[in-house]
Amino acid sequence: MSDGLQAESYHLIIGLGATGLSVAHYLDRCQQPFAIADTRHHPPGLQAFEAAFPNSDIWLGPLDAELLCKAKSLIVSPGVSLAEPALQAAREAGVDLLGDIELFCRAVSAPVLAITGSNAKSTVTSLVGEMARSTGLKVGVGGNIGLPVLDLLNEGEQDLYVLELSSFQLETTHSLEAQGAALLNISEDHLDRYASMQDYIFAKQRIFHHAQAVIYSREDEQTLPIHGQLAPQISFGLDKPPGPQDMGLLEKDGRSWLAQGEQALMAADEVPLAGRHGLLNALAAYALAAAAGLPLVDLAGAVRSFQSLPHRCQKVDVKRGVSYINDSKATNLGAALAAIQGLRQDYKHLWLILGGEGKGQDFAVLKTALQPSIAGVALIGRDAPLLAEHLPEGLPCWYPENLEAAIQHLASAASAGDAVVLSPACASFDQFDGYAQRGEVFIRCVQHLPD
């Protein structure tokens, strides 16, 4: 510890990277003393930190419990597990464990809409942001998407904030009082970090604490609030809305409509998001807009003009009548199955590319979930053998050397009217820098296929 920092007078940022760097800049603006600790010897953002704060302390390597216990508070980046023994020791010693979302919630007075879920968080967050902007509001969108939340404070005062929140971020958030809080869905994910599925669900459910309106999915009972909620509840689903505030589908004049209660809002076939899960995302966005008091009848234009985010059921091209869908963001089984369910009605057959790092998921459901519209599966990456154990008997399966070879093989097998879908159900770090690079490789390979 340098002479400039006295015990219990400084905040210790745990984990550098984009989040840690944004926290450092925020604390510097607030004239709060801080230091950084990171388990990595060459963390991302190290050079930028040293250039911006040449006189600040930084400790690299295994976390030191004695050091952590001397801090006023620990501001923990989402990538660091709270199960770290040094963090547990600090908590037991009475040191506050916070995250950047907590600091943000303490700093802002404008209303916040908060979104979490295993899948579709980024799409719904981005869509809600566009819907709110279309009404003339100044809107800050960030969190687990785009800018770290504390960087949003540099953009001036906003009328509304729309935040995508991961379970990791929610673990260190205590002061969130969202005007609308949505839990979109739950599927197995991050079981390499959580002791059980129930622990993961509890972490997600933290988004409902102190919310002014609670939003859940009728399609997924795991999103129902576990604890008693006095706040109004808004549900969304693909059936008829059960109550006047709920979102769903109505049949009217021979067409299906997105609706709140009995009020039709826009025709379902005008929603640009692919598949049935695209309709669910639009309905969730409308539910959040309702919680924010936005004029729902005026939002259809913003929905119609919304572009799908990259690597999320993104239609890349059509080659020789075969469509190629980049859903690289599907890093868990729930996301992949949502894509399959949503796309299977639009094509004669689906040819899948699965594989990567399975993150401890149970793939047993694949035995039934891939019937009957899946024509074949190419398995790639580290956990390809594990996935193969759970495929339906008789389903054609290949083990190409890499993603490029998988695309070449499926392109030769597919016929006009089919789709080749990269929806891996796994993380990408065994072969790629992240899901975005995996998706870019997919796009580049498809573009090189003959027309």
Image: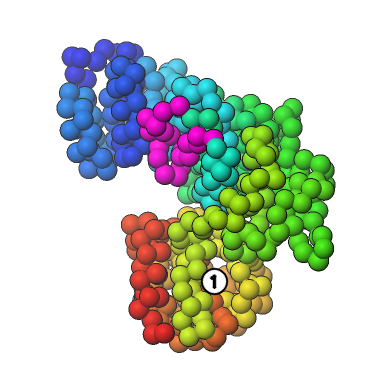
- Identify which residue is drawn at 46% across, 39% down: 142
- Identify which residue is drawn at 51% across, 57% down: 307
Name the spot of residue 361 as percent of width and height, x first.
Answer: 54, 57
Name the spot of residue 283 as percent of width and height, x first.
Answer: 67, 50
Residue 77 visible at all: no
Answer above or below: position of 148 versus 434. above
Residue 445 left/right relative to 46: right
Quadrant of residue 341 within the rendered picture:
bottom right
- Identify which residue is drawn at 56% across, 43% down: 134
Question: How crowded is the residue under tag 1: few (<14 C-alpha within 10 Å), some, or many (20+)?
Answer: few
- Identify which residue is drawn at 82% across, 48% down: 262
Q: Magenta stretch?
A: 137-157
Residue 46 left/right relative to 380: left
Answer above or below: position of 139 versus 372. above
Residue type (three-letter) at the residue carrying disc 1: Glu
In depth, the one of 233 and 403 nearer the eye is 233
The residue beneath circle 1 is 389
Answer above or below: position of 164 versus 337. above
Residue 20 left/right relative to 376: left
Name the spot of residue 423 as percent of width and height, x first.
Answer: 51, 66
Residue 352 magenta: no
Residue 153 left/right relative to 242: left
Name the spot of residue 354 as percent of width and height, x first.
Answer: 49, 69
Residue 256 visible at all: yes
Is the N terminus in the top left, top right, bottom left or bottom right quadrant?
A: top left
Residue 148 magenta: yes
Q: How many marks?
A: 1
Kind of element beneath mark 1: loop
